[in-house]
Image (cartoon, grey):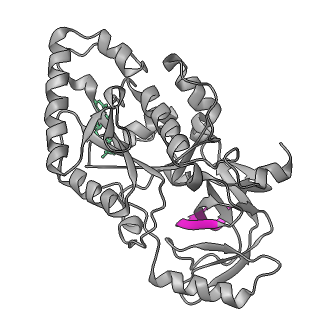
Amino acid sequence: RSKEALLRRSADNLRSPICCIMGHVDTGKTKLLDCIRGTNVQEGEAGGITQQIGATYFPAENIRERTKELKADATLRVPGLLVIDTPGHESFTNLRSRGSGLCDIAILVVDIMHGLEPQTIESLNLLKMRDTEFIVALNKVDRLYGWKPCPNAPILKAMKQQSTDVQNEFNMRVTQIKVQFMEQGLNTELYYKNKEMGKTFSIVPTSAISGEGIPDLLLLLVQWTSKTMVEKLMFSDEMQCIVLEVKVIEGLGTTIDVILINGILREGDQIVVGGMQEPIVTTIRSLLTPHPMKELRIKGSYLHHKELKAAQGIKITAQGLDHAIAGTSLYVVGPEDDLEDIKEAADQDIGTPICIPSRE
Ligand code: GDP
């Protein structure tokens, strides 16, 4: 497509939806992310979790490949899916809400053996407060007594392979969990039975160990967002970008990991980010991303880009980033812009950091 078409605001030019994973500790959030991305961060296989940017980009081709057994429409309207991985550590829990959430949709992970737990309810309250759409991943179905693994199978296919006992236990647990959601004022239903999507939240049973239901989860995420969020997902060249983390990387110095929500970033752009003493004005030296998907495990190696289009998780190297502050916006100084105005906006940001939901 022509460069102009790529910049035009239209339903044919959507950005990737941004998705975050939330839920109670130990429900399998890390494992689920590992499973969809085909790595094993949880057991340290990727070796370099610190090397990563707190976001994984799943290109549409990859999603198509993973979901082909579901025989869905091959044309995905979004270029991919950006999943934000914000472990519940300090730098994130400190960030306060600014009303506008960063995520377009969330995965709320619930352990099928435990049902709703205290942090599930906290997550639910955050989601309600921000009016964020979410899908429930009802995880650990492989722990149902007598479960027969069907690696990476769509959930209905896997269910058909199970004994009556397993199916009964599954139905009983799902019913109980639906009641628990009801007690929180929410209607939920297994996604393949959900006739009122939008009013009733969908449940996708999953196993992050053997991969059942993962195709269903991926497909539902991209289909639902591209069907119902067209307006919100239309690419806009009005830049929206936030600093996720400030990290020192050997050989690169102090870098910032950012989420580009909308717009384009280019090598050489003059940028302004919030700083401890005063806003930092600098120039992008390099725009880096991890290798997509599997190659994430190639420790310490990044792809270099001349420019990147939203939505993306990006590592930026530049001079003078030592005192940058996570949670603030990044601004690009355009030819028409007044640097002082932008610095003022960046300064105001520091008082009201944007909220990135902590996973726990
Ligand atoms: P988090 O705290 O939500 O990130 O949870 P983790 O991903 O660290 O998982 C917690 C524990 O549950 C680990 O021991 C995982 O191996 C295990 N686990 C996660 N998902 C599944 C699953 O689908 N099935 C089973 N049997 N175990 C799981």
Range of residues picked out in magenta: 240-257
Ligand 1's image quarter is top left
Considering depth in this image, is 300 or 303 the residue closer to the camera? 303
Q: Which of 324 and 176 lies nearest the eye of the viewer?
A: 176
In the depicted structure, whether residue 240 falls above or below residue 289: below
Please say whether residue 244 is one of the residues in the magenta stretch.
yes
Q: Give how far across and how far down residue 203 sits, in percent.
A: 31, 35
Q: Quarter of the image containing the C terminus?
A: bottom left
Frontmost residue, 313 versus 240: 240
Residue occupying image coordinates x 45% and y 84%: 351
Residue at 72% from the left image edge and 54% from the top image edge: 308
Instruction: Measuring from the top left, give residue 92's x and y in whole percent.
Output: 40, 65
Please state the horizontal and vertical placement of residue 226, each as a whole percent of the image: 55, 42
- Image position of 81 (left or right of 25): right
Q: What kind of secondary structure does the magenta stretch mostly adopt?
A: strand
348 and 104: which is toward the camera: 104
Residue 43 in sight here? no
Q: Please say if 294 is above or below 303.
A: above
Q: Is residue 215 visible?
A: yes
